[in-house]
Image (tube, grey):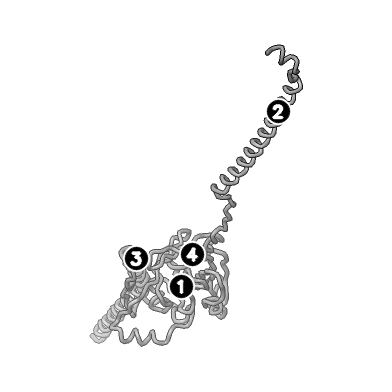
Amino acid sequence: MKEKYHGSKERSRSKAVSTGLIILSVVFLITGIILLLIEPIKRLNRQRISGEALNVIEQKIFESGADEAEMTFVVPATGNEVSGEEYDFIEEPEETEEEEEGSGGYVTLNSIGILSISRINIKYSVWDEATKVSLRYGLGHYPDSVMPGEIGNATILGHNYKDGSMFHRLSELKIGDKVVFKGTDGVEKVFYVEESKIVSADDLVDMAVGNITDTRQLTLVTCTYEYGRHGWRRVVICRMEPDPEPEETTAAYTEPYTEETSGQTEETAGETSETVETTAETDYETVLETTAESTEETPAPSVEETSEEA
């Protein structure tokens, strides 16, 4: 009897352990699935929001034309974080965290325009700051650089998402490739790639500020894993074609028509005067010669002949 009781108890205990293991396995499986889905879900959310932001900014630029309008878009202040964003790129302004805490869960981003590169098939809104939040949903303009198209260096930063979005394909750009920035006024500034290189994160600040050149330069920056570790940046330097200088044209000097006519008239008058004078002299000499010949050929009648005729 006791043996039967103990056997039943052991089976119940074994069954409970098995059930617990099954439940624990299911929990671990569900947790693992959730963990695996977190990043793809965040990625999809970032893509969706950045796409919506691009459409809104494009529409606002189209509708406003050259008029000033608020190019803003509201995004979540938290969530959709990017792995490693806390140390990426350049030091973030201190007030950003305070803004996130007191914003009611949302942040308003301000766009300065749209950057598009057809070769690597990207087109995103460029926000007026390069913070953790702004870089989740587009590209960011480094505030210590000039605006794209102005004289100086304009720096735009973007994440290197392994799904191929944002600046992931920046390393594929070749010398001479076209980079187009459309400002909020609808005017496009066209740049051409001059140089692409990898630099240390410590050297990035000196390449990102606006006063390093007196040309219209655009610098694109993203993280790179080409060296197998963090701390390196892919930097693509582009240059805007200089404005064409006006050609200096020197018109050939042409004398006024009246002066030419006057000169010709005077010359013609002079020639006519000379001709008249020459003709007059010739006629006068001819008359004198004719008169002299007539006088010589016709002798004066003598007195005797005159009296006989009478």
The vertical placement of 222 against 11, above or below, is above
Separation of residues labelled 2 and 1 (CA atoms): 96 Å
Q: Residues within 10 Å of mark 3 (few under 14, many from 20)?
A: many
Left or right of 237 in this view: 306:
right
Q: Residues within 10 Å of mark 2 (few under 14, many from 20)?
A: few
Counting from the top left corner in percent of width and height, residue 116 is at 43, 63
Residue type pointed to by label 4:
Arg
Q: Are marks 1 and 4 in contact (CB under 8 Å)?
A: no
Q: Looking at the image, is mark 4 or mark 2 earlier in the sequence?
A: 4
Separation of residues labelled 3 and 1 (CA atoms): 17 Å
Disc 1: which residue = 147
Image depth: mark 4 or mark 2 in front = 2
Residue type pointed to by label 3:
Ile
Residue type pointed to by label 1:
Met
Separation of residues labelled 4 and 2 (CA atoms): 107 Å
Q: Residues within 10 Å of mark 1 (few under 14, many from 20)?
A: many
Image depth: mark 2 or mark 3 in front = 2
Q: Looking at the image, is mark 1 or mark 4 earlier in the sequence?
A: 1
The vertical placement of 208 against 271, above or below, is below
Disc 3: which residue = 61
Counting from the top left corner in percent of width and height, residue 297 is at 75, 19
**In the rendered image, which quarter is residue 165 located in?**
bottom left
Q: Is residue 36 visible?
A: no
Q: What SS does tag 1 mark?
A: loop
> Residue 7 versus residue 265: which sits nearer the camera?
265
Disc 2: which residue = 286
Q: Looking at the image, is mark 2 or mark 1 earlier in the sequence?
A: 1
> Residue 146 versus residue 179: which sits nearer the camera?
146
Residue type pointed to by label 2:
Thr
Residue that appears at 33% across and 68% down: 67
Residue that appears at 73% across and 27% down: 289
